[in-house]
């Protein structure tokens, strides 16, 4: 897999959650922090996004706000509108909100697509740690693009319960997440992981590592794969990623191994082989150096990670349709 796909696949737990939400002016909702990555997409109307420690951001149709750590925030028709606590968090938004009554329908309405992704933060990938607290993708960057088409499809799917609805929503929400991250990485090419993915040599080395983490890579082999000198790759890789190539390879192997130990009953011999170690003993030694305990004890002491509000986390199925009526249209 390519690094971005690999990181998202490895960090995701449960299923994404989403719903179509309408607010009638005047409105001001204060949302609590959640242990998830949340998002707001403006479908129609306008509103203001109030981050925890920055100036308000005016949002219009096509704007996307992505909260990488699920920080506390607010939405309002105007920055001066008094705020009230939201009925529920982004991970509990009702995908089937009730129709507004006649009185509220006569007032200006803002319609948003809101939701959350559940991420395993027990061993967060440094690519995700590089992300800012809030990512804003303005409408000019989303309209008439693939991400705009995804938003239109999501809006259509949420409007009707058709055969294949749940699977379609899962796929579209995954695509939305990847496009949001792509959009950010494409704008930030100067330092860190954004620069690494845009550096041909470092990106080639990363693709090799993520494509075959169990392979016995050496710096010389990675450098040959990337078409650069051994010293040149080591220097550029370390400058951009924050650790040398083989150190990153070991970290990634141990991250994948820990996930297998925690979430599956795969035998240690198989995990050791998948991680690129010739023996279970060599794997156990490397694992203990990374986690401070042998793999067997780690497995016993670390049950599988479950998404918060597990029933609500099955967002595209029956549980979501019976979830708390959160963030409903203000009456």
Image (spheres, helix red, strand yellow):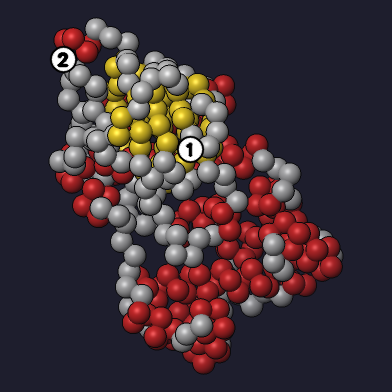
Q: Which residue, given by chain and number where applicable, does mark 1 sit on?
A: 52
Q: Are marks 2 and 1 in contact (CB under 8 Å)?
A: no
Question: Of the residues tagged 2 and 1, which is closer to the observer?
Answer: 1
Is 274 left or right of 305, judged from the image as shown?
A: right
User: Which image quadrant for residue 91?
Assistant: top left
Q: Write the residue at 43% across / 19% down.
A: 80
**Total labels drawn:** 2
Return the residue found at the far bottom: 281
SS for callout 2:
loop
Assign the C terminus to one quadrant of the image: top left
**87 or 41: which is nearer to us?**
87
Q: Is residue 168 visible?
A: no
Residue 101 disc label: 2
Residue 266: x percent and y percent?
36, 78
Mark-to-mark CA distance, 2 and 1? 32 Å
Question: What is the x, y in percent for residue 41?
Answer: 42, 29
């Amino acid at each position: 897999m390519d690094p971005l796909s690999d990181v998202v696949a490895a960090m995701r737990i449960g299923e994404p959650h989403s719903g179509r939400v309408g607010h009638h002016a005047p409105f001001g909702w204060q949302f609590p922090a959640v242990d998830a990555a949340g998002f707001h997409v403006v479908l129609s109307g306008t509103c203001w996004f109030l981050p925890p420690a920055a100036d308000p951001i005016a949002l219009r149709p096509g704007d996307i706000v992505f909260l990488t750590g699920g920080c506390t925030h607010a939405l309002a028709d105007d920055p001066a509108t008094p705020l009230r606590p939201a009925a529920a968090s982004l991970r509990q938004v009702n995908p089937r909100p009730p129709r507004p009554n006649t009185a509220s329908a006569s007032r200006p309405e803002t319609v948003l697509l809101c939701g959350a992704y559940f991420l395993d933060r027990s061993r967060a990938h440094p690519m995700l740690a590089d992300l800012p607290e809030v990512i804003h993708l303005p409408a000019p960057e989303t309209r008439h693009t693939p991400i705009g088409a995804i938003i239109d499809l999501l809006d259509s799917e949420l409007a009707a319960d058709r055969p294949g609805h749940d699977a379609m929503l899962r796929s579209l929400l995954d695509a939305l997440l990847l496009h949001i991250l792509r959009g950010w990485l494409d704008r930030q090419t100067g330092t860190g992981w954004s620069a690494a993915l845009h550096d041909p040599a470092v990106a080639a080395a990363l693709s090799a590592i993520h494509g075959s983490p169990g392979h016995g890579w050496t710096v010389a082999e990675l450098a040959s794969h990337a078409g650069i000198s051994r010293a040149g790759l080591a220097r550029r890789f370390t400058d951009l990623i924050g650790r040398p190539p083989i150190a990153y390879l070991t970290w990634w192997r141990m991250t994948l191994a820990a996930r297998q130990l925690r979430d599956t009953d795969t035998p240690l011999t198989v995990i050791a082989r998948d991680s690129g170690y010739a023996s279970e003993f060599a794997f156990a030694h490397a694992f203990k150096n990374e986690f401070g305990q042998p793999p067997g004890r780690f497995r016993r002491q670390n049950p599988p990670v479950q998404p918060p509000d597990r029933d609500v986390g099955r967002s595209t199925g029956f549980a979501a349709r019976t979830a708390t009526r959160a963030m409903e249209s203000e009456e």
